[in-house]
Image (cartoon, rainbow, N blue to C red):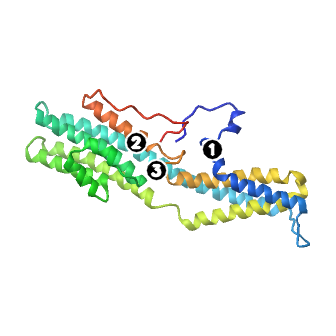
Amino acid sequence: MIVRKRPSAWRLFFIVRGSIVPKTAPQILATMLFASLVVYSHGVFLRKDLTFTAVPFTILGLALSIFLGFRNSAAYDRYWEGRRLWGEVLVSCRILSRQVATLIAPGQISDELSRLRRRMVYKGAAFAHALRHHLRGTAPDDDVRPLLSDEDFKTVLCSINPPHAILRSLSRDLEQCLSLKLIQAPLAASLDSTLASLDRVLAGCERIRSTPIPFSYTLLLHRTAYLYCFLLPFGLIDTVGLATPLVAGLVSYTFFGLDALGDEIEEPFGTQPNDLPLSALSRTVEINLRESLGEVDLPPPLGPQNYALE
């Protein structure tokens, strides 16, 4: 996610980091080059005049703008839902740490109870890291190993769904607390509800990751945007003349940029500059949970690197 103060008006034109220009530059340059050829030949190819009036491009451009706007709204809804779900991860993990500290054997102090509480709270932090790696398709070993016991780590490592394996392990810990009468059944139901909310978050994130916007809809917009931008010079040559490449470049920057931006935020859990900062969010969860245990040797929060927060 790009994190930076809004620059001055003039500097806005020269910002590259976080801009969609690097992705769309080849298409824009190709459009301007083709428009230059149209100007050079004045729209005549194979001895046929291919120039048109601006009317069909106005109608088609309006329709394309509406469809691109709708597609980008759908993509942003996915992005915002992903951010909302990760906000719920933070809230539920904080609730989990508070419930573990206050509901499991309240008032009792022993080394064994301290280890049990610490183990359960650490599993909450491990869940956040495992969820991030699960969504990005990366290995969670380095982030999860320090937070789990050797036995739990082996179980998570062998699972096809590491975050869900951690939730199952937390459920077993809760079952152990019930069997040892360290927590009353009504209070255990409250803690189990917190685990269920984390399970719902996991399912919601998996739904976003595994269900993209229908490919046929995206393909239609891609094709229409390319056809419009490459045919536009034939409708501009008679009205703007030598400025046709410039106008075509500005229009293609808008349409290709909106198309590329929709592609980028459609999958919010990736590692591109405009994706959600899952690394920073999971680090925040770990810091909050370890602080709730009274620890002071905490990992530092992640900050933006070159204006990008990962």
Q: Which residue is mark 2?
A: 87
User: Which of the two labelled residues, at mark 3 and mark 1, occupies the earlier sequence position?
Assistant: 1
Residue 51, position as x, y percentages in the image: 87, 65
For the residue marked with disc 2, what is the amino acid?
Gly
Numbered circle sitting on residue 68: none
Q: Position of residue 126 (x, y in %)?
A: 30, 44
Residue 143 in which image quadrant = top left
Q: Quarter-wise, where is residue 225 in the image?
A: bottom right
Name the residue at 86% across, 51% down: 243
Q: Which residue is mark 3?
A: 269
* Position of residue 297 in the picture relative to residue 11 (left or right): left
Spatial CA span between label 3 and label 1 = 18 Å
Mark 2 residue crowding within 10 angstroms, few (<14) / some (14–19) / many (20+): some
Label 2: state its secondary structure: helix
CB atoms of marks 3 and 1 within 8 Å: no
Q: Is residue 91 left or right of residue 212?
A: left
Residue 54 makes an appearance in the image: no
Q: Which residue has dot 1 on it?
A: 19
Mark earlier in primary sequence (3, 2): 2
Q: In the image, residue 29 lies at what x, y percent?
A: 74, 54
Q: CA distance from mark 3 to mark 2?
A: 14 Å
Give the answer, above or below, for where 214 lies relative to 99.
below
Of the residues shown, which amino acid type is indicated by label 3?
Phe
Q: Could you say which is closer to the camera, residue 253 or residue 143? A: 143
Instruction: Establish if 165 lies above or below 296.
Output: below
Question: Could you tell me the amino acid type at mark 1?
Answer: Ser
The quadrant holding residue 106 is: top left
